[in-house]
Amino acid sequence: MQLAIVVGHAVSTAKHISLVGWKLMLVQPLTSDGQGDGDPVLAIDRLGAGIGDRVIISNDGAGARELVGARNSPVRWLILGLCEDVG
């Protein structure tokens, strides 16, 4: 698990069947001091995260594929939670 900030979203006219119904959010992973940690990644979301929200993400691809119900899904990152306050 890692803290991240939502920096955008993706829109697709065609996507893998396992991702239908999921929002695709572009999130920037953060270090413990709040700095960017590498490149932004695409994460699935059903919690209602919006641009600027701090979120908890996971790169457990097997868990994400189980969540979407498809072993052959290309999903790797998912938003696990929304952060109200980081302090």
Image (cartoon, helix red, strand yellow):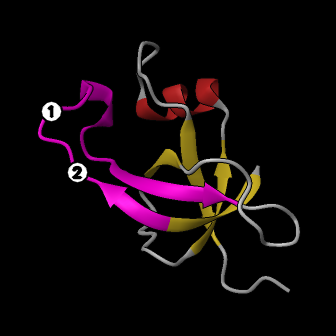
Q: Is residue 32 left or right of residue 25?
A: right
Q: What amino acid is labelled 2 in the image?
A: Val
Q: CA distance from mark 2 to mark 1?
A: 9 Å
Secondary element type, mark 2: loop
Tell me, yes or no, whether the two marked residues, 2 and 1, touch with CB atoms within 8 Å: no
Q: Nearer the viewer, residue 30 or 53?
A: 30
Q: Which residues, given as a range, are shown in magenta?
A: 7-29
Q: Name the residue furthest top.
A: 72
Q: Callout 2 environment at 10 Å: few (<14), some (14 to 19), or many (20+)?
A: few
Q: Is residue 69 left or right of residue 13?
A: right
Q: What amino acid is labelled 1 in the image?
A: Ala
**Where does label 1 land, which residue?**
14
Q: Quadrant of residue 64?
A: top right
Which quarter shows the C terminus?
Answer: bottom right
At x 55% / y 46%, what residue is drawn? 78
Q: Is residue 54 magenta?
A: no
Q: Is residue 12 magenta?
A: yes
Q: Is residue 73 depicted above or below 82 in this figure?
A: above
**Where does label 2 land, which residue?**
11
Q: Is residue 24 left or right of residue 79?
A: left
Q: Where is residue 11 drawn, in percent x and y?
A: 22, 51
Q: Is residue 54 depicted above or below 85 in this figure?
A: above
Q: Where is residue 26 drawn, in percent x and y?
A: 45, 55
Q: Quadrant of residue 54?
A: bottom right
Q: Nearer the viewer, residue 69 or 56?
A: 56
Q: Is residue 5 depicted above or below 59 in this figure?
A: below
At x 69% / y 48%, what residue is drawn? 38
Secondary element type, mark 1: loop
Q: Quadrant of residue 15?
A: top left
